[in-house]
Structure formats: C-alpha cells, structure tokens
Amino acid sequence: MPKIAMLGAGSLIFCKTLINDFLATSALNASEICLMSITRPKLDKMEAFVRRMIAENKLQARVWSTLDRREALKDADYVIIMIQVGGIEAFRKDYEIPMKYGVDQCVADSLGPGGVFRGMRTIPVLIDIVREMEELCPRALLLNYANPMAANCMALGRAASKIQFIGLCHGVQTTLDLISRYVDVPKDQIDYLCAGINHMGWFLTLRDRRDGRDLYPILRSNCEKPEYYTTEKVRCEVMRHFGYFMTESTGHLSEYVPWFRSHERSLKRYCDQPSFGGETGAYYQYCDMIAKKYEKTDYLTLESPKVGRRSVEYCSYILEAAETGAPFRLNGNVRNDGYICNLPAGCCVEVPVYVDRLGLHPLHVGALPPQCAALNQSNISVQSLAVEAAFTGDPEYAVQAIAMDPLTSAVCTLDEVREMTIEMLEAQRQWLPRFAGKSIAPKPIISIPADVVPVDVPLDPALAIAHRFGKLATQEVKPG
C-alpha cells in the first residue's frame, strides 16, 4: 500500500481529479492517501468526499488529512505538490498591479510580473519541503504541479538534493488533441517529439504512425485557413514565423513574447477570443469566480462519488509505472543535465521522460532549432533571475527579472519596471518572509534642465569617428 502525500489538498477541483485517477487505477486503488493543507474547511470537505468515493466504490484505499506537513511527509512514497502560496488574494495583486503599468497579462502565473512574484512566494516553501523529505521520506518521488513550473523546477534542481522530482503539466497532451483535429489523424496514431521549456515546448516532429507521413505540411497548410487560424492566432503566427508549433494556448503564449499584448492594436488583432484565447486577466477572473461560487456552495456535494475514467494528467500513470515497473513515457520538467544542449545547464527543460520501477529517465534531445532555443532563452533568463531572487532574498534580482520579461520590456521603461516591482513587493510582504527588512531603492528619472551643458569628454580622432558613425574606424584618420 503506497503512501501518497498530497500537499495543497484544499485545491478541491484539481485534487479530486487526481484522486479519481488513483482510485481508477488497479495498482493504486488500495493506496494510503494523506491530504494536507494549511487550513481546515476545504480539507475536511475533500476528505469526506474521498471517504464517500472509497466506500461507494468498495475500494481498499485509506484516506486521512492533516495540517501538519511533516506528518503528511513521514514515510511517504510519493509527494504531490499543488500549493498556491498566498491564494487568490496574492494572485489578484499579481494581475492588478502590473495592469496599472500597462502590462496586460492573460494568465499571470508562469512568467511576467505575476510569474516572478508567484515564484518568489513558492520557491522557499518548495525548498523547505525538499529538506523535510530528505529527513522523513528520502526515497520518495516528488511530483510538482505548482506554477511557475519552470522557475520552481529550476529551483528544485538547484537545491542540491538527492530527492527525485519531476514537474507536470498538461500542455503537451492538450496540444496534441488540437493537432490531431487540425491534421485529421487520431491522437494515438501520431508519433511526435516535443521538447523545449514548460509552456514553450516545440513539436519538432509530427508523423502519422500508420504510414510514416510527415504531418507538418498539413498542419502548416491548415493554419493558413481562417477557420483554423482564428482560434489559435498566436500559436499559428509563431509557427508561421519560427517554423514549429508550440505547446501553449494563445492566451498563455501571448504573455511570453513581446508581439501580441504590448499595445491595443496587437491585442485586438491576435487576442480577441474570449477567456484563454487572450482575454485580459482571464485566469484570475476564472479563479475569482470559482472561489466566490464555492464560498456559497459546497462543490463536492454536487459531484458524483462514482469513480470515472482517468484524466489526461500524467500523475497516476507515473505512479502506476513506478509501482508495476511497466514503462510509461511522458513529457516532464526536469533539470537540464545535457538533455537540450543549446539551452543552459541547470535550467528547467521539458523533454520526453520514461518512468519505471527504477525512477525517472529523461531522454537526450540534442540541440533545438536555433530560433526555438532563442525564444526559450528569452524566458529562461527571467526564470533564472526569479530563482536568484527567491534564493537570496535580494529584491534587485526581482526588478531585473521583470525588466528582462519580454512583454514587460515591450511596455515599460526601466524606471516604470522598478516602480511596479516596489509596489508589488510592498503589497505582498506577508507572503515573502525572505524579503523582510529589505526594500527596493527608487531610481526616478533624472531631470535635465534646459540650460545644462553636457560634459565635454575629448576623444582621439579615430574613436570620435567610431562614436559618430557607430562603427570602428578601419583606416587611418588624416588631418583635413
């Protein structure tokens, strides 16, 4: 009977999905499931519902709950992380404060100002969990669902721990569903290689398993047709210009690059579909709606306790492979130990991974097409600075991370970035204990009086020409 510790089990909808998957899996439906959260009301509701599921489906699983993280971790075989530090209140500040400065985020949980601050709130907690796992369940496998996925997993990779971890997302599975419809080939008949970073993975190959056909010509051709293009404008545009289809939706992807949300013209042209088709604040508004709805209604009382089909989430399949030894292949987020050779060592990459009884086995991909690596690197730079801020508690790294964000840098000047980061830090101090007593020095624009005389710095003639024309002088400068 494996012990599965679920941290952040107050996430009722997602936690229920994963538990249904476990109970629908013969190798897992007798597991010990420990639900852990930092507050009781939702946790009690989740535990009661799972007890109903177990009883009404006549299963051998056991469920219990605790507010004590160490108790949950003790002797666990699998640790699943679904935490959201600061909850909806912090999320609101991640979205609303940047919007005041013109940074229009659709999802705001993975990159940009929202992703940087969510990472700074979350990473210290993740590192604490890993240290406790080293003591209480050193052989357990850590499965992380908490965003910002790439920054969080980069931090886990820097933790110098022997705890095996993997970051899980459903971007590859859901994008493959879309590709299947766009090329009219059943999903289970498509052979593919997908690699890159979380929310920016590239489908490098797409082939029909039945006859070996390259499916990319069909995908590219159909994406030129209005009826296909209209629902995925951003992804189609990126493929048209960079050559490959990407794993994230229009709303998410539009946040990670500078071309689609930086001014009103581009928003109207590319992000005009509702909700996650690019709508401003779509994910915050959805989460706020769900939170308010279930304050009044117990969501789980409306749900059937009958165990249903497994979802597309990788989690139960990973645990099943680890328990049975039957290999399972997925795309997972791991430390880049040479798996993608033209992305930085130690960053987080999303690559094919096999799982069996011996653990995780990421596959070597090699080099991405250079243009794909370049787009990934624009996001990795932000992630690495956010991780640095979380590890050191130095808020200047937070300023620099947000300044390097592709969307923010297309909208804000450096002094505006600094003002925005100051405001976000002050608004979120209660969830950022590592930054206690630290502040960000404002650097207002230096005003220049009309009568100011620039300092005269004499240059030798060759350098003067280089300075004037923007290139080094290549021939001798002669008087006259």
Image (tube, helix red, strand yellow):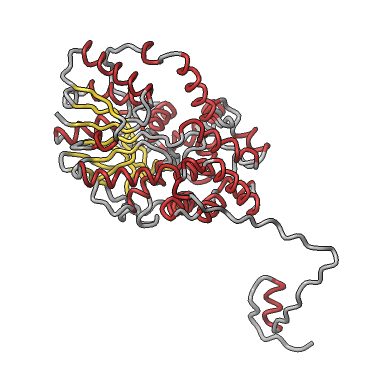
- Residue 157: where, in percent of width, then height? 32, 51
Closest to the observer, 183 or 416: 416
Q: Is residue 356 above or below residue 478?
A: above
User: Quarter of the image containing the C terminus?
Assistant: bottom right
Q: Say whether residue 352 is left or right of residue 452.
A: left
Q: Say whether residue 359 is left or right of residue 370.
A: left
Q: Is residue 370 visible?
A: no
Q: Is residue 304 above or below residue 264?
A: above
Q: Residue at coordinates 45% horizontally, 34% vertically from top-left?
A: 219
Closest to the observer, 452 or 167: 452
The count of marks equals: 0
Residue reaching furthest to the front: 437
Closest to the observer, 129 or 438: 438
Q: Residue at coordinates 62% horizontally, 38% vertically from top-left?
A: 99
Q: Residue at coordinates 36% horizontally, 15% vertically from top-left?
A: 300
- Residue 261: where, in percent of width, then height? 60, 39
Closest to the observer, 192 or 344: 344
Q: Is residue 88 above or below residue 465?
A: above
Q: Which quarter of the picture shows residue 355?
A: top left
Q: Say whether residue 271 is left or right of residue 448.
A: left
Q: Residue at coordinates 55% horizontally, 48% vertically from top-left?
A: 406
User: Quarter of the image containing the N terminus?
Assistant: top left
Residue reaching furthest to the bottom: 479
Q: Is residue 383 visible?
A: yes
Q: Say whether residue 395 is left or right of residue 453.
A: left
- Residue 78: where, in percent of width, then height? 23, 36
